[in-house]
């Protein structure tokens, strides 16, 4: 045990013992005995051919071995030692920092997990992709709650899902980014499952939501949002801005395709026309030649705007579009230029001179990406208050957009910075903090896997394809709505050959495209 130093307190988990170590004496003896048995058996198996005749011990070695515990000391453990409730006692889970092996029960409370899903905040869950791809049936229930229970007859979606607990509707202005993002996620979830009944059931409410969006946020009818747009930054944006408008464009494009699937020709044409007109208008209005900006003549008329600044989230809608498998929603070369600019201006290699007026998620010599900067001037008098903060969910989103744009090295640089900050010493590697521990926005990280694999899956059309961003030999876990397994590519006879090993489910009715 190393001598104590005050420097250890930064990034270490300190907990005063509330029970005597004797509570764990029997468990320690049992674990020690079992480990000793495993070691001896492995040695015997290696040297003797009669191993099978030895068999298992008639009783646990912990009861027959003379194990002496001479004492115990209070320690200060790295943050990857977790503490949680197991029944009525405090239990501990120790994580091996090298192997990742967990020595304890997994601290998952399924009740709390489901509760978090049910009262989910759409504008934060916009970013989260993990549940949608790993557990699409569970994610589908969130869309059912959002649209079938929390979207009223006008098409307005609540920002908190309280109806499942028979509580009154949450009284707050709707989140523009959340409601429109939920529309995109309907199509993503439909493609993950291929569930036509799900789409047909939810479609009327999707149409209502889009009608509400056009009336509430597109005040001049040019298919570019310009009204008061409540967002995940806990403020409203005013006037055309790329963050919410890119989500709007993604929603229009998804609705165009969904309308065709359900046979709604009227809305299919309506959304197709609106997308074509809106995308051209948005690009003309907001692309400054390098990245997308907010258009507001009097930038100081409203607090917490970003104006000519470079917002990391400026193409959040493009991220959602990639996750829904609909490709680029704005000119590809402009998308790439915008993401290169975000990396150029917003990625920091230290935080000694970065002001964060609320919370500091990266400090000193750490690397990370801030929410917004003003490289060309024009910083508002009262700017976006979270501008100097570092949100891992936004960082993953930017990394995904960079990788899809062909900037793989830049994208992985952003991801590496996150992992360096949450390395198990400075911070808990299993809890990327934002508005509290285990914040769901960080589940945007799943998008990095899809981006690196170039994974496109559509269970409705029965297609699956891989277009890896990494050109050399590689292997990776993959999952689609029908199966999961390992995708690998290896050079054979001078040619890169693809291999798909299905470990669960089947791809028999899926066309795997080259």
Image: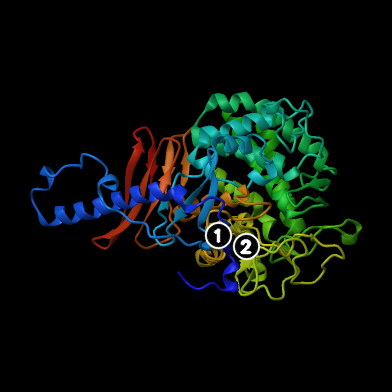
Cα separation, mark 2 vs mark 1, equals 8 Å
Find the residue positioned furthest to the left: 49
Please give left or right for residue 454 compared with residue 393 in the image: left
Q: Quadrant of residue 120?
A: top right
As helix, strand or loop, the secondary structure at mark 2 comes to helix
Counting residues from the start of the chain, the first of labels 2 and 1 encountered is: 2
Q: In front here: 424 or 218? A: 424
Q: Position of residue 312 (x, y in %)?
A: 67, 60
Q: Is residue 95 left or right of residue 256?
A: left
Q: Quadrant of residue 187?
A: top right
Q: Residue at x 76, y 31 (%)?
A: 155
Q: Quadrant of residue 483?
A: top left
Q: Residues within 10 Å of mark 2 (few under 14, many from 20)?
A: many
Residue 455, position in %: x, y? 46, 48
Q: Which residue is mark 1?
A: 405
Residue at disc 1, secondary structure: loop
Q: Which residue is mark 2?
A: 339
Q: Is residue 74 visible?
A: yes
Name above or below for residue 500 compared with residue 170: below
Residue shown at the point (38%, 60%) measured from the top left:
70
Q: Residue at x 72, y 75 (%)?
A: 353
Name the residue located 66 percent from the left edge and 37 percent from the top edge.
Answer: 183
Q: Are marks 2 and 1 in contact (CB under 8 Å)?
A: yes
Compare residues 471 and 121 and report the one nearer the observer. Answer: 121
Q: Find residue 234 and report its horizontal and vertical position in percent.
A: 78, 50
């Amino acid at each position: 045990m190393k001598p104590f130093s005050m420097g250890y307190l930064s990034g270490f988990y300190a907990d005063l013992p509330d029970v005597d170590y004797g509570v764990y004496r029997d468990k320690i003896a049992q674990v020690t005995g079992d480990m000793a048995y495993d070691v001896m058996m492995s040695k015997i198996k290696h040297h003797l051919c009669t191993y099978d005749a030895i068999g298992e011990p008639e009783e646990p070695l912990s009861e027959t071995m003379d194990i002496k515990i001479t004492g115990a000391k209070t320690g200060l453990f790295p943050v990857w030692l977790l503490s949680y409730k197991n029944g009525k006692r405090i239990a501990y889970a120790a994580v091996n920092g090298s192997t990742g092996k967990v020595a304890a029960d997994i601290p998952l409370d399924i009740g709390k997990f489901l509760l978090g899903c049910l009262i989910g905040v759409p504008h934060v869950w916009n970013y989260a992709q993990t549940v949608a791809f790993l557990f699409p049936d569970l994610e589908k229930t969130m869309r059912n709650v959002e649209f079938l229970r929390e979207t009223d007859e006008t098409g307005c979606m609540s920002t908190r899902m309280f109806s499942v607990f028979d509580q009154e509707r949450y009284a707050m202005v709707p989140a523009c980014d959340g409601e429109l993002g939920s529309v995109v996620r309907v199509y993503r979830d439909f493609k993950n499952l291929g569930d036509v009944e799900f789409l047909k059931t939810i479609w009327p409410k999707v149409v209502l939501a889009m009608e509400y969006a056009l009336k509430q946020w597109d005040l001049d009818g040019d298919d570019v949002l310009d009204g008061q747009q409540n967002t995940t930054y806990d403020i409203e944006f005013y006037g055309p801005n790329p963050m919410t408008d890119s989500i709007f464009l993604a929603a229009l494009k998804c609705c165009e395709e969904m309308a065709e699937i359900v046979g709604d020709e009227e809305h299919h044409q309506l959304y197709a026309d609106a997308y074509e007109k809106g995308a051209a208008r948005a690009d003309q209005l907001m692309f400054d030649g390098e990245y997308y900006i907010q258009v507001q003549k009097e930038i100081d008329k409203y607090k917490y705007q970003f104006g000519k600044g470079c917002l990391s989230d400026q193409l959040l809608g493009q991220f959602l579009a990639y996750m829904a498998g609909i490709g680029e929603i704005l000119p590809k070369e402009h998308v790439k230029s915008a993401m290169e600019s975000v990396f150029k201006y917003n990625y920091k290699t230290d935080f000694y001179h970065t002001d964060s007026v609320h919370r500091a998620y990266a400090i000193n010599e750490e690397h990370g990406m801030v929410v917004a900067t003003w490289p060309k001037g024009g910083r508002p008098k009262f700017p976006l208050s979270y501008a100097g903060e570092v949100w891992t969910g936004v960082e993953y989103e930017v990394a995904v957009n960079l990788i899809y744009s062909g900037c793989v090295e830049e994208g992985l640089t952003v991801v590496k910075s996150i992992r360096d900050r949450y390395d198990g010493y400075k911070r808990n590697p299993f809890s990327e903090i934002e508005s509290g521990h285990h914040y769901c926005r960080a589940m945007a990280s799943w998008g990095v896997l899809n981006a690196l694999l170039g994974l496109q899956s559509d269970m409705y059309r029965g297609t699956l394809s891989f277009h890896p961003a990494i050109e050399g030999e590689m292997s990776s876990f993959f999952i689609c709505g029908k199966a999961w397994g390992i995708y690998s590519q290896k050079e054979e006879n001078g040619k890169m050959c693809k291999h798909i090993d299905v470990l669960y489910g089947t791809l028999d009715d899926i066309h795997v495209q080259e």
